[in-house]
Amino acid sequence: MTLSADQVPDGWSDGAEGYQAQFAGFTGLYADAALDALGVVAGTRLLDVAGGTGATSVRAAQRGATVTCTDFAPGMVAVAARRLAEGGHSDCVTALMDGQD
């Protein structure tokens, strides 16, 4: 079986910066509502599976949550790590993990 580019890490890694620039803002439109529904506040520990470039993770960290952001694409993880670091969220971590397994 042949997998499409969106089913393999390289397909996402290669376009991580472009994804962040073009599409990640749309995630923010529902991320805050999801975090509200989950009751994410300061002190919350949050695991973000398939976190991409960290749109939800960064918003959770801004609320004071301690976040572990995972994704299967190294490029996406690198962008999320950079964004969390730029925001001063040193208590948050990123990890390369495949949430499908």
Image: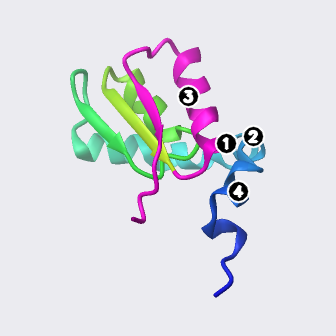
CA gap, disc 3 and disc 4:
18 Å
Q: As shown in the figure, which amino acid type bears the numbered disc 4?
A: Asp
Q: Which numbered marker is on residue 10? A: 4
Q: As shown in the figure, which amino acid type bears the numbered disc 3?
A: Ala
Residue drawn at point x = 45 percent, y = 49 percent? 97
**Residues tagged 1 and 2 counted as in contact (Cβ below 8 A):** yes
CA gap, disc 1 and disc 2:
8 Å
CA gap, disc 1 and disc 4:
8 Å
Q: Which numbered marker is on residue 81? A: 3
Could you say which is closer to the camera, residue 56 or residue 80?
80
Q: State which quadrant residue 33 falls in.
A: top left
State left or right for residue 67 relative to residue 82. Answer: left
State left or right for residue 53 relative to residue 49. Answer: right
User: Which tag, 1 or 2, sits closer to the chain's start?
Assistant: 2
**Residue tagged 1:** 75
Q: Is mark 4 on a helix, strand or loop?
A: helix
Question: x%, y% of residue 4?
Answer: 69, 75
CA gap, disc 1 and disc 3:
10 Å
